Amino acid sequence: MTQQIDKDKKPFCLWTGFKILSVPLAAAATLALHLLLSRGNAAPETNLYSNCLIGALGLGLAGLLAQFLFPAFKVWLAHMGPIFAGALVLLGFWELATSGLHLLPMPYFPDPPKVLGSLVHDRKELLESTYNSLLLLLGGYSLGVVIALITGVCIGWFSTARYWGMPLLKIIGPIPATAWIPLAMVLSPSARFSAIGLIALAVWFPVTMLTASGISNTRSSSLDVARTLGADSSYLIFRVAIPAAMPNIFIGLFMGLGASFLTLVVAESVGVKSGLGWYVSWAQGWAEYGKVYAALILMAAFFSTLMTALFKIRDRVLVWQKGIIKW
Amino acid sequence: MVTTDSFSPNEGAPLRIAGVCKDFPAPDNSATSVLALDGVSLSLEPGELVSLVGPSGCGKSTLLRLVAGLDAASAGELTVGSEPITGPSAERGLVFQDPNLFPWLSVRHNIQAGLVARKLLHNKRHEVDEFMRLVGLETFANAFPHHLSGGMAQRVALARALINHPKVLLLDEPLGALDAFTRMRMQDEVLRLWQARRTTMLLVTHDIDEAIYMSDRIVIMTPRPGRIERNIEITLDRPRDRNSSDFLRLRGDILEHLHLAGASEPRAKPEPALLKSD
């Protein structure tokens, strides 16, 4: 720790300087490469892409100036700079491999300007698809979590529920939710409805399993203490067993979120006529691979935002674990 | 700072244990059973502090769990005041060697757990602060248990048990995991709480000095099956001097009894040199 402080206090450190400089350097290099490769090409999307790179270069230079004024920003920039620079360099390699050296077959691997062009051109459809995916995902996920928490707590706490519920859980649970698609299509009145059901099913299994095991592994000494403090069974369940199971429950919630992404995309591409999963297969049908990648980029941003949100919730709920486990 | 309503003296009630037996199914063969307690009878006056000592496996902790109502006796009767013990209750507090704090609750919320459980928090919120002051943890109100030292955690556990104003406080080696210095300070702290409240206390301990230093009476138990071997009144004036000749003589007597009772502890035999040294 002290070493770290000493390192930052040095008037000039070559390595830190390089990390701070990395963003504008990478932006300049990628821009130069792009300008070199797109000579004579007047497609509007290439201008858009070079404008974005100029923007990145501008931001990098602005950061370079700002870090002289704000020491805290300097630390952040030195930490994050290489990541941003790496992303810019990756864009450069991508362009080099596609429109530069033509290493990858067209039209399956469009260059970055084309993907960016699709992203901007189709923004209305993409946003609408994202919104529809979000509705479907949140609907299915919350439904699955609510049911899973109820079944998980019952199976974990009541021995009768455990006796009947556990075999059911063990047999039905491992079937991937997407395997139910044929049945869901027959049973449900609408594709949206069946997609929500499938997502809920995908979430239900891991959350129930982890909740049940967390509840049944509550330390008996915690329950004993609560009993001698005058606790009734609702206190034992809601204020001892469930908080004790929370770390486990969150593992289930993370697993469930991953399973819900998968199920969402599959359900959208086979039944539902909207959403990002549908957009990908639709764009593929028209061989518009720029749009496919645009949707994939949006999907990555969308899913990782949801993951981050769940992490934030966990950090709040399990703040008491800070210091016990590696955070 | 000490208000009368939360520190009314003589909160203790008499505890009567009459002919209590407890058997457990044998671990290897459920058809047979192991007798853990055999006809244990013991009465505690209101406000009396009694220590249970004895070798491992003599059923001290089993007896405490029966009094707490966490387990049911196979035979015999247990009563607090005039009421038979049928299950756990807030009027019989229990503190274990492991403080067993709820790790997800802050110090304040751990201490008020009993009030929340009994739905009294709204009326008795002021007592939470009093009890935090009582055990000297008001500055740690928002800390989570794993940030506390062993002694601090055990003080939270004591406050958590005491906030229910139990008639009987059961202590199962509460200071066993603490270092020698903290342990001696905590002994005084428990005595201070006991003298302020006159709660009836039943203390299980392995530490003979602790038993002599704290109790009105020491009950020696023998193992397999657990039986009461002997009651020893401790009439030394308080506060007691751990190095007085009376203290050391008692210590020798009790170690002798434990030795006769089949204790396998290495220091069961009194060391003559130590006893003569004063």
Image: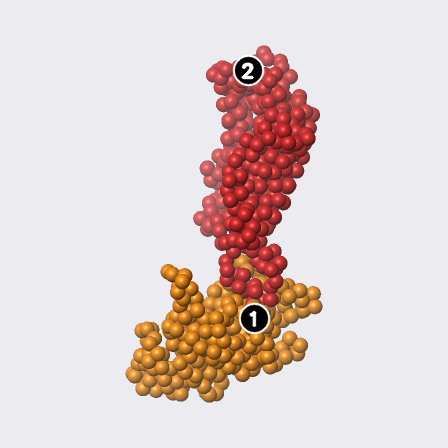
| Chain to which the residue tagged by mark 2 belongs | A
On residue B48, the disc is none
Judging by the rendered image, the residue that carries numbered circle 2 is A107
The crowding category of the residue bearing disc 2, from other C-alpha atoms within 10 Å (few below 14, some 14 to 19, many at least 20), is: few
- Above or below residue A120? Residue B130 is below
**Circle nearer the viewer, 1 or 2:** 1
Q: Nearer the viewer, residue B77 or B149?
A: B77
Tell me the element at label 1.
Answer: loop
Image-quadrant location for residue B252 = bottom left
Q: Which chain is red?
A: A
The image shows residue B214 at horizontal and vertical percentages of 47, 80
Judging by the rendered image, the residue that carries numbered circle 1 is B86
**What shade does chain B have?**
orange
Q: Amino acid at mark 2?
A: Pro
Q: Nearer the viewer, residue A68 or A48?
A: A48
Q: Can residue B207 be seen by looking at this rendering? A: no
Residue pictured at 53% horizontal, 25% vertical: A91
Q: Can residue A111 be seen by looking at this rendering? A: yes
Residue pictured at 56% horizontal, 45% vertical: A208
